[in-house]
Amino acid sequence: MNEAQNNMLYYTGVILKLESDRAIVLTDGFDFMELKLKPGMQRGQHVIFDETDLYSAGFITKYKNIIRPFSALAAAAAVFLVIFFSLRFASISQEYAYIDLDINPSLELVINKKETIINAKALNNDAKSILDEADPKDMLLYDALSKILDISKKKGYINSDNNIVLFSASISSNEDNASERDKGIQEIISTLKDAAEDAGVTFQIIPSTEEDRQRALEQSLSMGRYAIYTKAAEEGINLDLEDARNLSVSEILSKLDLVNFAVSNIPEDSDIVPTVSVIAELRQALRLIILLHRK
């Protein structure tokens, strides 16, 4: 490391405003600085930077000269702004809902209330390469699903023999308003349907709860696979945990007639299409799910 690097000054602060080519930052020393805009910057984000990141070197001096006569007022305002934007940033990053996707690769996407992906996790080995290629973090849910489904087709996970995608979704217990949970799950289901239909895949969607998500994780299952596994047990159908974990969705559903508790676009000429009585059971099951969310 040379002498210039040793003498480099580093600053820390919080981003207050984003413009087309720059970010306005309030430093820990209560100075306002302009940084060159970089991908991934967000309001409320804490950043570490040096003078090479500055949009204009003169910006520091200009604002220091203005602020110093009003240092007490500026400090109080700055503390308020830091708290406000930090809380706002925390809210934006907060886990709001969990979406599991099963083909044979199984993965989980975590979204905030704006349906932006804040975390993604492979639930089995096949899903790791898909997530590595898709890199869905910070994407909108629809865009992430579209990319994941496209990659799954290219890798051969979705094909003529294995063409059913199972989605499952639950709202975080952080959302304690029952009507908001109901509204949220319906909005997510709508996004899942749009992404699947636009990708041209056959799908089923199973609404779930965070309690069932925790039970599923304990068994190393996605929410959807766990729902099918428990439903099979209720129906007296033999489906062991290993099959529930490892078989493709198409293989599982070829053994079971369990589409009655999922939102589905399985075509009418399919061997596993629900009957009229089953469709009635679907409506009843969805009403039950909504009631469970309200408790």
Image (cartoon, rainbow, N blue to C red):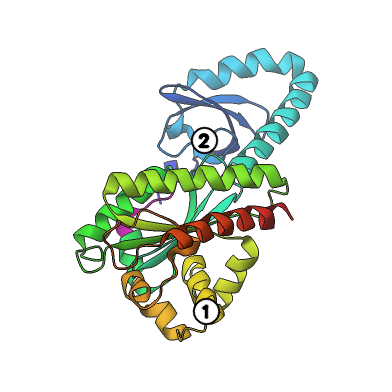
In the displayed structure, 238 sits above or below 15; it is: below
Could you tell me which residue is drawn at 46 percent across and 71 percent down? 225
Q: How many C-alpha atoms fall within 10 Å of the one at disc 2: few (<14), some, or many (≥20)? A: some
Per the image, the residue denoted by label 1 is 235
Mark 2, secondary structure of its residue: loop
| Residue 130 picture quarter | bottom left
Could you tell me which residue is drawn at 50 percent across and 38 percent down? 49
In the displayed structure, 140 sits above or below 231; it is: above
What is the CA distance from the residue labelled 2 to the residue labelled 1? 50 Å
Per the image, the residue denoted by label 2 is 42
| Residue 120 picture quarter | bottom left
Tell me where the magenta segment starts and ends, as one range: 132-137
Mark 1, secondary structure of its residue: loop
Which quadrant is the C terminus positioned in? bottom right
Q: Are marks 2 and 1 in contact (CB under 8 Å)?
A: no
Image mark for residue 164: none
User: What amino acid type should be assigned to the residue bearing mark 1?
Assistant: Glu
Could you tell me which residue is drawn at 76 percent across and 15 percent down? 70
In the displayed structure, 226 sits above or below 52; it is: below
Viewer-side residue, 261 vs 62: 261
In the displayed structure, 107 sits above or below 52; it is: below
Number of numbered callouts drawn: 2
How far across and how far down the image is residue 279, in percent?
46, 57
